[in-house]
Image (cartoon, helix red, strand yellow):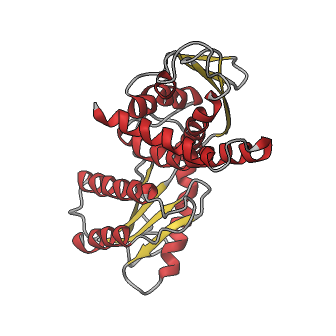
Amino acid sequence: MAVCIAVIAKENYPLYIRSTPTENELKFHYMVHTSLDVVDEKISAMGKALVDQRELYLGLLYPTEDYKVYDYVTNSKVKFVMVVDSSNTALRDNEIRSMFRKLHNSYTDVMCNPFYNPGDRIQSRAFDNMVTSMMIQVC
Amino acid sequence: MADAVLFEFLHTEMVAELWARDPDPGSGGKKKSLSVLEGLGFRVGQALGERLPRETLAFREELDALKFLCKDLWAAMFQKHMDGLRTNHQGTYVLQDNSFPLLITMGSGSQYLEEAPKFLAFTCGLLCGALHTLGFQSLVTASVAALPACKSLGSPQV
């Protein structure tokens, strides 16, 4: 189940963060923040693939819960970070990739919206609905 | 394709509208209209810069981004590729188009040379906006030597 989805802008500030279980939202924000460093490392390491995928097992910090963090970088250096509960091991690579593709498509739609100023927080309801559907569907 | 011509008409009207209010605006007003056009182009360029490279691989260097501009962006906007891309290896790129679709209808030669910059402002903004989304702050200027060929100079800095 995707527990948290975040869209980070080029300058590394969040455009959109949403997490499902309402208990420690701050914990997810923190996780997303720490994942940014790893993302930067990967980007500078150079590769031809567009999708940067990273699996981060936080088993050490949280002995009771395991999370996997995936992330995807677009050409415009916008990062999508997704935190997934890894007790649901049925989630396959392809599914993650298709989720990111949907995210990217929705983000592009938001960008093309003339009422949206690039750099503002994303407040589009369509984007919200799409993210909600992704968080519930996988759960 | 009928769609290409729709954009050309819209663009011509945009320029005409901005100039219609004050046919002889003087240098202050003229600059303002030009920056309005550039601003329009910038926002459109930002959106296009997000939408067009969706399925392509990541741009590893500046040159990739410039090539994307010359091929994909130009093809999407004007249904043709840019005719030439040169660089002085010090950060400036010259993009040359020998038959720019927005100028072709005005005739060839040097007859309307002074009116030409108005019609290039939107495109300059477009290039600037697309470069901005791809991560490069840049300065784009355009010049016309003889219609309908035009050159744009871009100096991107990361």
Q: In this rendering, does residue A50 appear at all?
A: no
| Residue at the spot 47% in from the left edge and 59% down from the top edge | A114
Q: Quadrant of residue B74?
A: top left
* Place of residue A102 in the rendered image (x, y in percent of width and height, measured from the top left): 30, 56
| Residue at the spot 62% in from the left edge and 35% down from the top edge | B118
Tell me if A81 is positioned left or right of A106 in this view. right
Q: Residue furthest bottom?
A: A23
- In the depicted structure, whether residue B15 falls above or below residue A120: above
| Residue at the spot 52% in from the left edge and 25% down from the top edge | B103
Camera-nearest residue between A93 and B48: B48
- Total labels: the figure holds 0
Q: Quadrant of residue B9?
A: top left
**Which quadrant, please, contains the C terminus of chain B?**
top right
Tell me if A1 is positioned left or right of A58 in this view. left
* Place of residue A110 in the rendered image (x, y in percent of width and height, measured from the top left): 42, 60
Camera-nearest residue between B3 and A45: B3
Q: In this rendering, does residue B112 appear at all?
A: yes
* Place of residue A120 in the rendered image (x, y in percent of width and height, measured from the top left): 56, 66
Camera-nearest residue between B43 and B115: B115
* Place of residue A86 in the rendered image (x, y in percent of width and height, measured from the top left): 31, 67
**Which quadrant, please, contains the N terminus of chain B?**
top left
| Residue at the spot 24% in from the left edge and 51% down from the top edge | A94
